[in-house]
Image: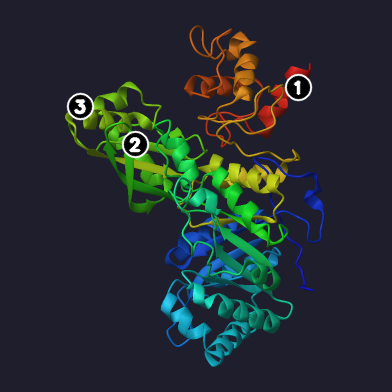
Amino acid sequence: MRKHILPVFVCGLLSLAPAFASAGTDTFEVSGWLPYWRSATSTKDVMPHLDLLTEVNPFVYTLRSDGTLLDNGKLDEEPWVSFIAAAKAKKVRVVPTVMTSNSALLHELLSQSKSRIALEDTIANLVKEKGFDGIEIDFEGKKAEDKDYFSTFLKGLYQRMGNKWVMCDIEARTPLDARYYGTEIPPDAQIYANDFTQINKYCDRVKLMTYDQQTIDLQLSSAAASSSQLYAPVADPAWVTKVVALAAKSIKKSKIMIGIPTYGYEYVVTAYAGNQYVYDIMWTFNPLYASQIAQKFGVAPSRAPWGEMNLSYINSTNASTTAPISSNPYLAQAAAVAASQYASSTNTHTEFRYLVWPDAASVAQKIALAQSLGVRGVSIFKMDGGEDPKMWDVLAAAKQSAVVNSPVVPVSSAAGANSFTRALSLGSTGEDVRLLQKTLNSDPATQVAVSGAGSPGAESTRFGPATEAAVKKFQIKYGIAREGSAGYGYVGPATRAKLNALLSG
């Protein structure tokens, strides 16, 4: 039995389960990675918010070619020394990460008993000598032939660690029917480099790297393409749900942590006739970059149907291609439509840029998803001052709240809605959106529209900009949220509670 340190925990979308003050091992946990390449800003960013976390993971150690560890972050120096001391004083676990994505090196070290045992000893001794609460293993890009070697390594490390924690970062595994949707599943598709059964046995926490989704889920990509919707998410909750369901067949939910990204991607998208798009990644970015791009090109970011923020722009001075953006600034589709129309009219193809990134509201959405799925908690990559700073407000509000489980915001919902049971935001569709519009239209102060779609008697199933504006009016009227709040314009637990109260009253 592992020795468990009392965790401080957060859960729910701007909400927290009532058991907040309880001790033991059944509490919801929040951990976060602090990257060594931003040591100063990472520690400065997290230090004031340690009370909101269960665990911190200095992302600092990498494997050398001889199997020894390189401390890129220099944990024996400031600012880490003071940071680690502060974390320990608040009973926050300090569990550094050992990372590599060198497949050849991993094969060399793990496939030989001598080097594998030496690595187990090196890591266990480091943890005990430095007084860490455990270690986190982030070995990515392993070869399938090394699956058993990796399991043997985890077993040996687990045995050596005693009452210290063994945390494992594991790549997300997409169900085959979704990954190869519409195509033939390759014969070797089920040959994996991770043995989930053994990982469940020898890892105290399994942190699923549920990010960098991009276009791996062909089923979700196909659904988006059928409606000409841009779709290249960092992490769609619908995809995350699939990943967790598959992992939970072999790994206890009480060990699973859902990875939450705080960075985004910029793509060069090639548009072809008929609203067909091909995505090529340019780079990752922090949210501030998206704000700068939005300001430079005069494009208003909007919330994508899966909950993240997005925008598109055409990096051109051609007025004919940029006009659709200014005429409809709410839609990320604006540049996409302009590019597609140009490709169709000229029988060629053209390019535009597409940005997608998580903000505080989508981070909150993932926390709510983790709670609704009944997993151990969430792990945030990364905490370094580059994320949406309102994320901390989300975590603080979550800790103080006593509102229970909040479902994720999916793309659509079941028909016949008579109450609000899930989060809703720009892009959501379903009968509960129609019910939302009807409820908002019952009060002239929160009316969605005077005429046309969304107006009284013409309520629709689509949550668009007019519905978002009406939700904001509703939140202001009842003191639920205001400009600058993470949940502003987002139908979260507090907003749903008031809506349901009005329906029952």
How far apart in space, not on screen, are marks 3 and 2 (Cα)?
20 Å
The amino acid at mark 3 is Ser
Q: Position of residue 176 (x, y in %)?
A: 53, 54
C-beta proximity under 8 Å, tags 2 and 1? no
Q: Is residue 3 left or right of residue 222?
A: right
Q: Residue at x 42, y 79 (%)?
A: 104
Q: Secondary structure at mark 2?
A: strand
Mark 3 crowdedness (10 Å alpha carbons): few <14, some 14-19, many ≥20: few
**Dot 2 corresponds to which residue?**
312
> Residues under labels 3 and 1: Cα distance?
52 Å
Instruction: Please say whether residue 78 is visible from this viewpoint.
Output: no
Quadrant of the rendering where the N terminus is positioned: bottom right
Q: CA distance from mark 2 to mark 1?
A: 39 Å
Which residue is located at x 54 percent, y 58 percent?
172
Q: On screen, 189 above or below 290? A: below
Residue at image coords 52%, 44%: 236
Q: Earlier in the sequence, mark 2 or mark 1?
A: 2
Q: Tell me the SS state at disc 3.
A: helix
**Residue carrying label 1:** 501
Determine which residue is flagged by label 3: 345
In the image, residue 403 lies at what x, y percent? Answer: 74, 38
